[in-house]
Image (cartoon, rainbow, N blue to C red):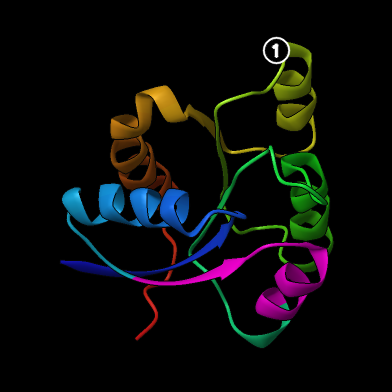
Amino acid sequence: MRPIRVLVVEDSRYAADLNIRQLKKSGFDVEHQMATDETSMESALVNQPWDLILSDNCMPTFTALGALAVRNRLSPHTPFIIVTEHMMEHEINHAYSQGLTAFVSKADLSDLGLFAQKILSEYRIPIYK
């Protein structure tokens, strides 16, 4: 199994766990941390490198676009995937224009592992141990 570090920007522990389970089903050995707002995301990005960032869009005080802006400022080369139920097409298009790597609907969560495999092989992300 390939080890990866994943920062999950999500306000629901259940949803974060579903994301991690999907990555594990795809053959990743996942070390992860959950961030629920801008401050915790900034702290996580400053404290260690990440192979991948997953972000929900529907959080009480934070959005995927806000999380993408934090990524762009602190870790611009880390692949960023939005994993959410609700996001308007124009918001998704705007996110791509701002450096979004991929979008996965929670209704199609089984695609997450395939996206991660493709993205991480293309980015040739170093594996942290």
Q: Is residue 123 left or right of residue 127?
A: right
Q: Which residue is mark 1?
A: 89
Q: How many discs mark residues in the rendered view?
A: 1
Q: Is residue 22 left or right of residue 19?
A: left
The stretch of residues the image draws in magenta is 31-45
Quadrant holding the N terminus: bottom left
Q: Residue at x 54, y 53 (%)?
A: 12
Q: Quadrant of residue 86?
A: top right
Q: Is residue 25 left or right of residue 125?
A: left
Q: Say which of 71 and 22 sits in front.
A: 22
Q: Residue at x 82, y 48 (%)?
A: 66
22 up-or-down from 24: above or below: above
Quadrant holding the C terminus: bottom left
Amino acid tagged 1? Glu
Q: Residue at x 45, y 30 (%)?
A: 106
Q: At which x and y percent is residue 55?
A: 60, 48
Q: Residue at x 30, y 42 (%)?
A: 113
Q: At which x and y percent is residue 43?
A: 74, 80
Is residue 18 covered in magenta? no
100 up-or-down from 88: above or below: below
Task: Specify the farthest residue to the top.
Answer: 89
Element at label 1: helix
Is residue 32 covered in magenta? yes
Q: Say which of 4 and 20 sits in front.
A: 20
Q: At which x and y percent is residue 111?
A: 32, 31
